[in-house]
Image (cartoon, rainbow, N blue to C red):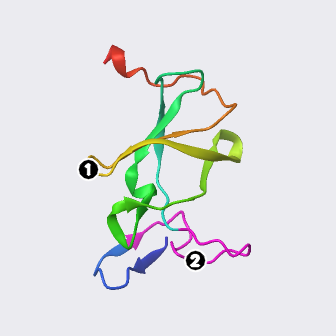
Amino acid sequence: MTIKLLRGCGMILVNTFEYPFGDVYPKGDTRIFACTGVFIDFDDKYPKILTSASLVRDPGDPNKIIVDLRIEVLLPGKRCEIGTLKLHSLHYNVALVSVDNYRPLCPVNLEEH
């Protein structure tokens, strides 16, 4: 079991599955945020991932998104693809990300619910 005290927050992180955010990776990139999402049927050929807008929110200005952000999506089978931000609402903290050429087995159809 991994337990870490988060700096300045007074919170304890238990059973982590990620590396600490903000670490510089060997390629020089910096991970800013990681989150989960769910595939939904939306409006075109490929389903979109409904996720948190915190993924694209600028940590320096919470009312803006990061320009030219690289979104990496980990798909089943540990396949990693580049995602594209399609829509976002910082007010509602939601974002839609697309992954070309990937069809999930059963995306959620929001119109049925």
- Residue 44 tag number: none
Tell me the residue at 35%/17% (across/down). 111
Extent of the magenta region: 13-31
Q: Mark 2 points at which residue?
A: 23
Left or right: residue 8 versus residue 79 is: left
Residue type at mark 2: give it: Asp
- Residue 91 tag number: 1
Left or right: residue 47 versus residue 64 is: right
Looking at the rendered structure, the secondary structure element under dot 2 is: loop
Looking at the rendered structure, the secondary structure element under dot 1 is: loop
Residue type at mark 1: give it: His
Q: Residues within 10 Å of mark 2 (few under 14, many from 20)?
A: few
Residue at mark 2 to residue at mark 1: CA–CA distance = 28 Å
N-term mark: 2 or 1: 2
Q: Residues within 10 Å of mark 1 (few under 14, many from 20)?
A: few
Q: Check the image and report above or below for 72 versus 106.
A: below
Quadrant containing the C terminus in the rendered view:
top left
Q: Check the image and report above or below for 93 versus 4.
A: above
Tell me the residue at 54%/27% (across/down). 47
- How many numbered marks appear? 2
Image coordinates of residue 80 in percent, x first then y, are 69, 48
